[in-house]
Amino acid sequence: MSKYSKLRNESDIRGIAIAGVAGQDVNLTEEACRDVARGFALWLIDRTGKTNLRVAVGRDSRLSGEKLLGWLADELSKEGIAVTDMGLASTPAMFMTTKTEGFMFDGAVMVTASHLPYNRNGYKFFTPDGGVEASDINAMIALAESDRHSGLAPAEITNGEFMSVYSKRLADMIRSACGSEKPLEGLRIVVDAGNGAGGFYAEKVLKPLGANTEGSRYLDPDGSFPNHIPNPENKEAMASITEAVKESHADLGIIFDTDVDRAGAVLSDGSELNRNRLIAILSAMLLRDHPHTTIVTDSVTSSGLAEFIAQKGGVHHRFKRGYRNVINESIRLNSEGVDSQLAIETSGHGAFKDNYFLDDGAYIVTRLIIELSRGRKMGYSLASLIDTLKEPAESREFRMNLSLEDFKPYGQKIIDELKEFAPSQEGWSLAPSNFEGVRVNLDKQHGNGWFLLRLSLHEPLMPLNIESDDEGGVKTIARELSGFISKYDLLDSKALKDFAE
């Protein structure tokens, strides 16, 4: 195993930056961070062929952020790369430093670990072409583990500021679409930033447009996350923004993850707008302007969402989990002449074709706010856009650990054998066009729903998602599946068996 292999997280670097959590030793040490920074510098020099490179760096609110950014900036400058420290920023904003006139950096790095606990941190890397791929991370780590240096003269580190520029771009989008300098006057929109980096949206986007943001929560950055985890998928986080909407009688509530590349929302009636519902409303908006476009999602979206997109005249293309996977699949489809305007995961990672296929939570909610304003003028609500969305009666996820180090062959064996087993079962049928794991549909007599068993990309576990259109259907499906699953003694299926029984 290589020195830094445990820091690889598909298309970024993540690790433990703060000691104190039981059983977790710091692996984002100063040495590791400096080596990774050197690896990125050498990779960027090799990629561009340039020796006068400029890189922007930023961070979210994590307690370890300033330290990790400092090590990164210092090492990049030692390798001859001019660094501009943008301070507290969002991940999408850091990418936009490579695309915005007056900035146009050769690369950018964001210090973040997204929604992970406070003691974690990491690095996300960008070029003007977008976020780096897993293969690029592998190349950077190989360079980090080498003793190679650029040989260039050290460059300077300067301080900069970009969030006001980024915020103005979003505000100008709303002004242009709504045809007014203060298009949000008369609207109350509350934001829950969870003490991450998203507080700017209330202060620098909504308020200048006339919105009333009273009732917003946790806008101040605090890397200990004292109120709740900044994560639109977290129950406590969604309960917080829902409560804020109801208390303030707001027209819309917005919640971001720590680095603002994901978002969720709450409608004025207190109903959540995340996962399948968020995908549905964005699809409805896009299909009005781009008829027949293809919406690429991850593998765990509901059957009702597929029906909804088809009803609206679109094509639902269910693909693999992982935000880079859905983005790259949408880009691939477009390159083959298939129009695909949106790539989105149920986690809230959403990337629009007209925004560089950048997964940007602030851009998502900006589109929602434009639609909110449009609906107010034309007499419809956001909720009305998804009033035909068929939602499951029940859904549940089981995360089953694999108790062996080389877990992928064993996990794949389970998937392969389940694919062979499923067609022989009464009322079961393999889902068509399945790109990940095994997805099985079950008829009315056998649970009236579906399940998806897949293998985690990085961790020794197998997530199992079950959804049913009937009350009690998830338990019926779990009971039918449990007998097959229980024969694999290295797969911890106790939670599934206990639920089924």
Image (cartoon, helix red, strand yellow):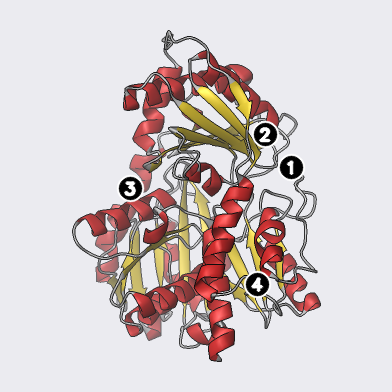
Q: Nearer the viewer, residue 308 or 124?
A: 124
Question: In the rendered image, which quarter is residue 318 located in?
Answer: bottom left
Q: Judge the density around disc 4: few (<14), some (14-19), many (≥20) Cα neighbours within 10 Å.
A: some
Check if mark 2's residue and mark 1's residue have beta carbons within 8 Å: yes
Mark 4 / mark 1, whichever is N-terminal: 4
Looking at the rendered image, the disc whose residue lies closer to the viewer, 3 or 2, is 2
- SS at circle 2: helix
- Residue behind mark 1: 223
* Mark closest to the chain's N terminus, 2 or 1: 2
> Disc number at residue 412?
3
Q: Which residue is mark 2?
A: 65
Q: Earlier in the sequence, mark 3 or mark 2?
A: 2
* Cα–Cα gap, marks 3 and 1: 38 Å
* Nearer the camera: disc 2 or disc 4: 4
Question: Could you tell me the amino acid type at mark 1?
Answer: Gly
Disc 2 from disc 1: Cα separation:
9 Å
The x, y position of residue 236, in whole percent, is 71, 62
Measuring from the top left, give residue 198's x and y in whole percent.
66, 53
Cα distance between the residues tagged 3 and 2: 38 Å
Q: Residues within 10 Å of mark 1 (few under 14, many from 20)?
A: many
Q: Residue at x 43, y 32 (%)?
A: 106
Q: Which residue is mark 4?
A: 182
